[in-house]
Amino acid sequence: TELELELGSSTQTSHRLLAYSDALLSIIATVMILPVAHTKIHPDQKLGESVQQLLLTKIAVYLMTFLIVTVAWAAHVRLFQVIELIDDVLALLNLACMMIITFLPYTFSLMASFPGVPFGIFLFSVCAVVIGLIQAVIVVYGFYHPHLLNQQIQVSENQNFYKRHILKIILRGPVLCFLAAIFSFFFIPLSYLLLGLVIVFPHLSRFITWCKTKIVGPREEEEASYSLETFSFYLSEPLSKERVEAFSDGVYAIVATLLILDICEDNVPDPREVGEKFHGSLLEALSEYGPNYLAYFGSFVTIGLLWFVHHSLFLYVTKATRLMGLLNILSLAFIGGLPLAYQLTSEFAEKSHNEIEAIQVSCVITFFASIFQFAIWTTALLHERETLHPFARYGGKEHAFMFAKLALYPCVSLGAFFLTCLLSEFSTEIFHLMQIVIPFAFLALRIFVRISLTVIKSVMSLSRRKVV
Amino acid sequence: TELELELGSSTQTSHRLLAYSDALLSIIATVMILPVAHTKIHPDQKLGESVQQLLLTKIAVYLMTFLIVTVAWAAHVRLFQVIELIDDVLALLNLACMMIITFLPYTFSLMASFPGVPFGIFLFSVCAVVIGLIQAVIVVYGFYHPHLLNQQIQVSENQNFYKRHILKIILRGPVLCFLAAIFSFFFIPLSYLLLGLVIVFPHLSRFITWCKTKIVGPREEEEASYSLETFSFYLSEPLSKERVEAFSDGVYAIVATLLILDICEDNVPDPREVGEKFHGSLLEALSEYGPNYLAYFGSFVTIGLLWFVHHSLFLYVTKATRLMGLLNILSLAFIGGLPLAYQLTSEFAEKSHNEIEAIQVSCVITFFASIFQFAIWTTALLHERETLHPFARYGGKEHAFMFAKLALYPCVSLGAFFLTCLLSEFSTEIFHLMQIVIPFAFLALRIFVRISLTVIKSVMSLSRRKVV
């Protein structure tokens, strides 16, 4: 940092600005699960109906927010891979950008409550356009002060080409949103289609190029492909691993702490009620909430251990490709759904008919969160030379252990799901047993893996002997 | 990281574990402001009374949680300055520790609701004892696998002395809590006193040593002071600057995003109401919420800019002393109060009599948050050789600019406070004008400072000429 401070009186490294932005974006992406989780379910209603009600509005808001914020986050990562140093003006512009992004969930809430009114979609589009314009100003400012740029762009001869290309990528979304804003007054479905395109576009364009190269073969113009290749180094391919980790940490942290907030707001008994109903015995009043505490500790353990798996995985990941980033975001979207699972399992106290459904929803959410983590690992293995540390590759000494770590949660949650289907009477017991056993399973995993490896080896050597 | 991976198959750097712990702890410290902010104030009640009501329970819970969590955080920082590498067992033990810490706010809620019942204080003490025991296990585990320890302790001859000393520091709090748990059944005030001692103890013991050295003079036993000195390098003096930043970022990020959550839950109009009351015009219904949006953007700007000031300050801080850490935590405690200020200023819509009081509370909170930042700066200046980058010291080229940056918010919020006292009719206008003007003031600050420096210089040279 000393070196950067020397460069110009106000020039700074961007490290902390990015960490703060990651924290803001991850919290905003996740926090919209709270309105979902806070939706009151009547105890005499079947869970099926109410879940359908939820699905239509609040879950849609949560998922839309999550996806749009992650798109904005990915754009932010790209932008600050181009601009590596910042000064006060850029820091303030970035904060303005963050302010508009944190306002997006509100526009989604409006859209979900009033799907037929153009105003919600108009407001969202205006925000997106403003965000795009601020980011464009950041790019223009950066290229006007080239010492802030990435070293490789700084020394490049055709800076203008880079600038145009980056601006094109940044303004692609806002232009679509601008069109959506205009169409919102004439034909709303088209607006929604355009907004959907904003989310899908980066992946779609990539998929099309991939198809093209498969069908037509790689392009042959030497010059153009060269300049695009050096460029794609910054803008298409690897996401900064550090920022993927920071964003993920933010999501895990906020999800883990949303739970205690609910406990503190809902499960402190009313002093008057304690006096009347429980003859002044606080302990008796609190024992009513027993299942809530169990659900809290169970959810915290699940989130903590999924973080632990993520942490172990990324310890051996040397480079995060775009596909791995996408899978990570899908995993995080389900992690964000865990407070909903908590809310459902904590309703056990009211002895509704929904026990099994609640447990199964929890199992499904946990399963998808963990299976996408597993998918990151398998994707990394496909290009293991670039993406993984030697220890974690096929034949590496940590390979089997990593495999077991990542496979544990998908297997256990799937197992619990089917067990509750078969033994529906003991579903609660099965679920809590699962939550208690898993931490110890992780502690003893290394020993298990070592034992099973020795067993496999000895079995194989035995069978070889027999063959001989 | 490659090097650390080689050390042992499961040994890892602790960087990400610490970042995640910082995120969890900062969110938990701050999130208890939500129950405070969500307390409904009747529009016909005077704000004075209801604020007093709040003060007695919920604000007390918030402050107690904040202080206890920061004490736990400081202990965590110390602990992982001793243990520098981790493995899976330590990661899982740390997660268990985090789980108990996130449960603490609930015990405070119980204490605040039932101050006369021993159970709340008993539960808290039990949690604190469990946390202490887990941390003791972490220390023992670390010293059993010395390759995980800090390099300087690793090569030291009297490892056992270090181990005992660290265990003593870690178990000091839990022992007090254990006593508090026992006394909670006999004489509750004593329990509260013991718990208060846990928070004050580190600062108190430091203050006593400071007084001793002032009165008696520094100790003269060569040998003992030497071993204590090398030790205090880890445990008493500088906090890891990186972790102070990470913790602060977490608080700023969660406070900034709590606001939009309130907006999303409270300010989406009911479709039926829009149909009946506003003849189906969403825009008209939303215009009711105008002041809420203003309050939201105003609060976000305040938080964002206070983060910006903090970020600028710590860019030039090379080492964070304990006193600076304490001032930082006091500043953050007031930052955490800003959602309350938002909730108060957003009540303007209801045209209650509380406008001026609400604005004044906001000004006071902002003033204290920023004056403690200023205090960090002045404290750093006292030992500028150790704590500040040369640019920011007296006579450094950034000194005047830093001074202006840090003085802006205290001055403006104090000014706004007194202006609203004098011109009570225009208080709302003054407040909003302040919030709009400040970002531009920050953008133009460098120019202001340069101009005023030139003016001062020319005035001084003129006066010198006159003297000649």
Image (cartoon, coloured by chain):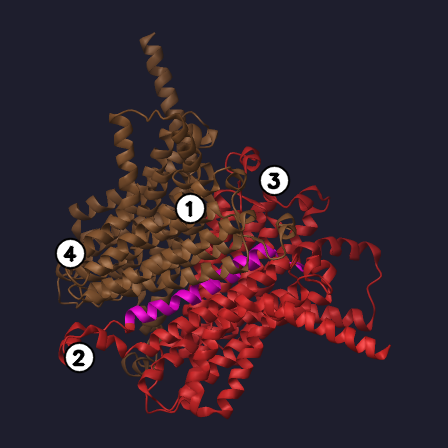
Chain colours: A brown, B red
Give the residues drawn in magenta, as a range.
B236-265
Mark nearer the N terminus (3 vs 2) = 3
Evaluate whether label 2 is on the same chain as label 1.
no
- Closer to the camera in the image, B421 or B326: B421
Q: CA distance from mark 1 to mark 3?
A: 38 Å
Q: Earlier in the sequence, mark 4 or mark 1?
A: 1
Mark 3 element type:
helix
Q: Which residue is mark 2?
A: B278
Tell me the subunit letter for badge 3. Answer: B
Characterize the magenta stretch by its predominant secondary structure. Answer: helix
Q: Are marks 3 and 4 on the same chain?
A: no
**Figure quadrant of residue B40:** bottom left
Mark 4 touches mark 2? (CB < 8 Å): no
Q: Amino acid at mark 4?
A: Pro
Q: CA gap, disc 4 to disc 1?
A: 31 Å
Calculate the distance from the C-alpha at mark 3 to the C-alpha at mark 2: 70 Å
**Is B238 contained in the magenta span?**
yes
Q: Please state the horizontal and vertical placement of residue A116, each as a whole percent of the image.
A: 15, 64
How far is the residue under mark 2 from the one under mark 1?
Answer: 44 Å
Quarter of the picture holding the N terminus of chain B: top right
Mark 2 Cα-neighbour bin, 10 Å: few <14, some 14–19, many ≥20: some
Residue A189 marker: 4
- Report the amino acid beneath label 1: Arg
Tell me which amino acid carries mark 3: His
- Answer above or below: position of A214 versus B204: above
Q: Which mark is residue B147?
A: 3
